Image (spheres, helix red, strand yellow):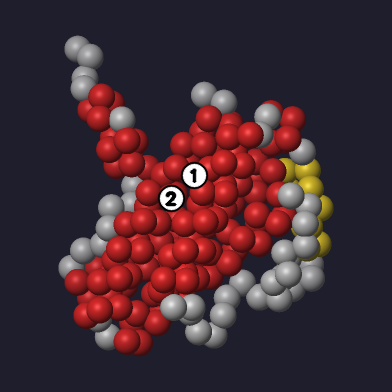
Amino acid sequence: MSTQTLLASLFSYKAWADEGLLAGLVDLAASGPADEYRTAARVFNHACIVDRIFVANVQRLPHGHAATGAPEPPPLETLAEAVRETDRWYIDYVARLGPRELEERIDFSFTDGAAGRMSREEMLAHVATHAGYHRGEVGRILTRLTGSSPPDTFTGFLHQAEPARRAHNA
């Protein structure tokens, strides 16, 4: 499997898992404690901001963010739109990349002004893994309050997306 193929699969998985988490946030907003919803939405918003920062970084563009979070999360509809738009962007972007572009090292600045240098594939791997960490954080809040959280495993995504993977060849 090529790096590009793996990244394409990981970003499709990320979009699938983000949809599940957005549904969980809708339920939490409707029936959960307001402070717990706010915490969960702030965490998910942070992940989305980082995703958008790296959209700029992989393109060698300024990201325009002074921080990776916000004191207050945006309205859920606004956050959902930003998450979906960003997920679609990554899926489309990864599909267009070739091996040389993936390996290319890019200089960028973190929000604190510190310099960074990573290859595109390292930046893309960071986005995929960083998002998973924070979905887990929000998932813990949902599980504590409701007893469950949306499915969020790569294997679960692969088997739902390709049911034939469940068949065993004896």
CA neighbours of label 2 inside 10 A, class few (<14), some (14 to 19), many (20+) = some
Q: How many marks?
A: 2
User: In this view of the protein, which residue sits in the foreground, 5 or 139?
Assistant: 5
Name the spot of residue 42 as percent of width and height, x first.
Answer: 47, 76
The answer to which image quadrant residue 13 occupies is top left
Residue shown at 58% from the left, 34% from the top = 95
Q: Which mark is residue 122?
A: none
**Figure check: 122 above or below 52:** above
Please name the residue that numbered disc 2 is placed on. Answer: 15
Q: Residue furthest top?
A: 170
Question: Alpha-carbon neighbours of circle 1 within 10 Å: few (<14), some, or many (≥20)?
Answer: many
The answer to whether residue 131 of the structure is visible from this angle is no
Whether residues under marks 1 and 2 lie with C-beta atoms below 8 angstroms apart, the answer is yes
User: Which image quarter holds the C terminus?
Assistant: top left
Whether residue 51 is situated above or below residue 98 in the rendered picture = below
Query: What residue sits 65% from the left and 41% below the top?
Result: 121
**Secondary structure at numbered mark 2:** helix
Residue that appears at 30% across and 78% down: 29
Measuring from the top left, give residue 136's x and y in whole percent.
38, 61
Where does residue 35 sit, x and y in percent of width and height? 35, 87
Q: Which amino acid does the dot numbered 1 rest on?
A: Phe
Instruction: Find disc 1 in the rendering and name its residue.
Output: 11
Q: Residue at x 51, y 37 (%)?
A: 8
Does residue 73 appear to the left or right of 93 in the view shown? left
Q: What is the quadrant of residue 101 in the picture?
A: top right
Kindly identify the amino acid type of the residue bearing the numbered disc 2: Ala
Between the residue at mark 1 and the residue at mark 2, the CA separation in whole angstroms equals 6 Å
Where is residue 77 drawn, in percent x and y?
Answer: 41, 71
Q: Mark 1: which secondary structure?
A: helix
